Image: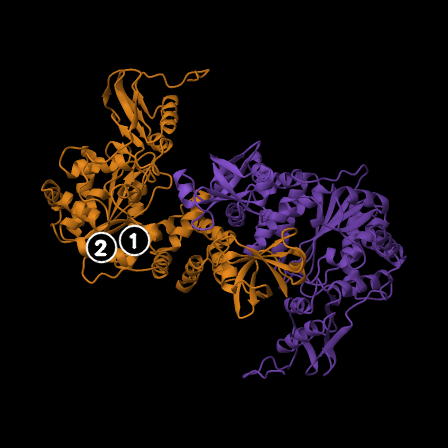
Chain colours: A purple, B orange
Amino acid sequence: MLQVLPFDIEIGQHKVMLNVENARERGLYAGDRVRVRAKGASTTAILDTTTQMVKPGEIGIFTEALKDLKDPKQVDILPAPKPMSLCYIKMLMDNQKLEEDQIRAIVQDIVDNNLSEIELSAYITASYIHKLEAQETEWLTRAMIDTGERIHFDTRPVMDKHSIGGVPGNKVSLLVVPIVAAAGLMIPKTSSRAITGAGGTADLMEVVAPVEFSAEEIKELTETVGGVIVWGGATNIAPADDKLIKAEYALSIDPYSQMLASIMAKKGAVGADSVVIDMPVGPGTKLPSPEAGRSLAKDLIDLGERLGIRVECAMTFGGSPVGRTIGPALEVREALTVLENKGGPNSLREKSLSLAGILLEMGGIAGRGGGYKAAEEILTSGRALQKLLEIIEVQGGDPKVTSESIEVGEQCQDILAPVGGYVVAFDNKRLVELARMAGAPSDKMAGVIIHKKMGERVRRDEPLITICSSSDWELESAVKDAKRQMPIVVEGMLLERYPRVMEI
Amino acid sequence: MLQVLPFDIEIGQHKVMLNVENARERGLYAGDRVRVRAKGASTTAILDTTTQMVKPGEIGIFTEALKDLKDPKQVDILPAPKPMSLCYIKMLMDNQKLEEDQIRAIVQDIVDNNLSEIELSAYITASYIHKLEAQETEWLTRAMIDTGERIHFDTRPVMDKHSIGGVPGNKVSLLVVPIVAAAGLMIPKTSSRAITGAGGTADLMEVVAPVEFSAEEIKELTETVGGVIVWGGATNIAPADDKLIKAEYALSIDPYSQMLASIMAKKGAVGADSVVIDMPVGPGTKLPSPEAGRSLAKDLIDLGERLGIRVECAMTFGGSPVGRTIGPALEVREALTVLENKGGPNSLREKSLSLAGILLEMGGIAGRGGGYKAAEEILTSGRALQKLLEIIEVQGGDPKVTSESIEVGEQCQDILAPVGGYVVAFDNKRLVELARMAGAPSDKMAGVIIHKKMGERVRRDEPLITICSSSDWELESAVKDAKRQMPIVVEGMLLERYPRVMEI
């Protein structure tokens, strides 16, 4: 018997730690599985070994396994087999084709936290290097759907929208969802929060309403008002994705087949029949060329067919931000301005109407080619605004919100054009960086207002951008950084100077 | 400032844990690097996030980072860049060629524990899928040598021997090292312990002498008596290897280029000029065909040339065990029997003389083709035995040890042939399994004695093998298991029976 040393730390895994000496005696090594038996309880755990932390005769047990074992004083252990999914991951490394049940075993073990970080990483790395075939990707998607919660609507059709991402200021869901819902279609939109961006749709919506709901609540709210805009991460929809994203983020990779499966699993799990996918193309986005976009579109449409989901993809211009704001509150204010028909940037209005139009056509509300006009009519009539306010209310927000009532950062500072001329370079990534330095997305009021876009004429000392923040010092540091390396370059402007002149 | 929650657990990494809320506010995610600053101390750590373990405003800090920070009460954190080696690992995933400094950065970060398990696993998986080129493998080997301790001998030549492994009972180093040292050559042999086998050379030598020494001690002992047989894992020689092996074991993979580099790094670090590599070929080994062996030999010789090390490879028969024993004490006894010229199996004697002969030729002691005879002369004259006893003494063991004084398990039981006939099948892996079930390698006295090999004639009720152990119940379970599925099959023997008859 081994004396239990409780390691009361949640590490997302069933894990125990033995002294190397004890492990060696038992023919066990780090990474092996062991069956841990206490009085009246047992569990399987991943073994780690140590020379110091745990003395011979002891066993360190982390929180997750401790709970299963009901906080025992003593346990004994037996070697246990590694999960079969490890063999399948090895097959993937060897570029062998996988069967449906093999893929399902991998996904189930990911969801159940049965794989160590080493094993999960091997899966992600192998699936980054070796693309899955279409049939395998379908099985992967189905496994991701089936291992989580699903929503089954009683009526049809159910619409959805997704963006590949990669373009800043892409607040179009705030317009597309209410337009589609106002037309009488259901659209239960789950969105993400920003990871490397300045605000995901969930971060934006949270400015005006709560966004964390269960799958059951999403169904209920959608059936009540036709649509929702909620955070997918709060649900248990396609839960494998969250665990995969965590490791993908750590490795800064986005395995292609896994990306296809993750997108479509979330759509499949909410019961969508028809999905429009926004694919921003251009320098700095995830799709550098239209060819890359077309190839992705083909694969998404094919995967949709296999799952019984109609997919249409819309390649959009991703070379500059959508609209003229970046950052949660600023973006919501801009979206409301368009919904209120009080102006707002044309790029935002056009893109939203185009995407909404496609969904109206897919949902049978408008004939082929008539979607844009139908969407425009809904927007212009004020029905889209009305629907968004209903959605805000049903999610628990204030339905009296207006573009003017949205608070944005009190601290704002302009970055002026040092010379007059035309904008000749425009750096999306820098703009996002500056918004993040100002505090976005967690500081909802932080962000960047863009006054001049590519090719526009600017006079000397006219503002190029305005940076906003709730925090003095974050604003200061963002402004300093903006001046050090300008996100927008006017022809004839001095780009850098050596030796650099420090600003005090 | 964040309140420190000490997580006093060594996890082999600098790691801190934040509440997701705090992390999100700071734009940080699991896997990011952070600079942690306390009063008068700071360190860089890998961030993990949690929803429960750590409350907002707190930070969990594991032992390794706590030490660097001198057990602070409060710290603050700043985002820090990820190590550059991650970019190089990404390049490897993309099958791009790496430069010397890039490979060196990866190896240095592995040695310094700067990579998370997710990142290390991605490196191993990528290097399993994409073989390195010869030039890259050279750089990898050099980096593995340079990031650890090295031995520089004042005189030359320095000989060494390595076995690819995969054949049970391969105790030849116990004969090769003393023969070579008795001839006046230096041979500082570092060996491994068994991982999946029933005894590595280090486990064997430990039966008669201590095997844990520093690089400095290895040099001194070798200069005193000409050779040592020690455990490489106790030194800081090519330390990247231990960390890589841990993750490779967890994934059950052995990346090819990494294997080449690991073998040659250990030889290069002890200052070897001439190395013989034993390559057991045959079913059940790591080299199923002579072609696979030739290709590996070519790569090892080429890598040796690049490093200035002469390499000769000897393909040996790996289809059945070397000698007739498996398990530490049994194998040492068998090796001593041969050294004492009191008999012992021919397969062990022949193989040892062949390998030692190659080293004698490489070291200039014998002319080309004359090595075997020279080695035989040293063995027959008793000088090899004398030298092994000197090595045992200098390592702190008893130089009066003899084949008869070696204690083997008191509990021994024969497995009898159920029918008479010829041995028609012989399962190496099963024999190793049985030796391990009996307690090898940690129970030094446990193991298997083989009475009949492939093709030999056996009478009914003659013993096929004998299983030994220090433990009653381990012996019992190994014997039961041997009878359930026999490792040695005699023609005409009943293999299995359905329904199975349980033995009580």
Label 1 packing within 10 angstroms: few (<14), some (14-19), many (20+):
some
Q: CA distance from mark 2 to mark 1?
A: 10 Å
Q: Chain of mark 2?
A: B
Please, what is the three-letter code of the amino acid marked with disc 1? Phe
Where is residue B12 drawn, in percent x and y? 47, 54
- Left or right: where B118 falls relative to B348: right
Residue B450 in view in this figure: yes
Q: Chain of mark 1?
A: B
Q: Which mark is residue B28?
A: none
Callout 2 touching callout 1 (CB < 8 Å): yes
Q: Confirm whether circles 2 and 1 share one chain.
A: yes
Q: Position of residue B214 (x, y in %)?
A: 30, 56
Q: What residue is shown with label 1? A: B213
Q: Nearest the camera: B57 or A435?
A: B57
Q: Quick check: B351 above or below A428?
A: above
Mark 1 residue element: loop
Q: Which residue is mark 2?
A: B221
Given the current orientation, which residue lies at the most extreme right position? A381
Name the residue located 34 percent from the left edge and 59 percent from the top edge. Answer: B145
Q: Along the polypeptide, which appears first: circle 2 or circle 1?
A: 1
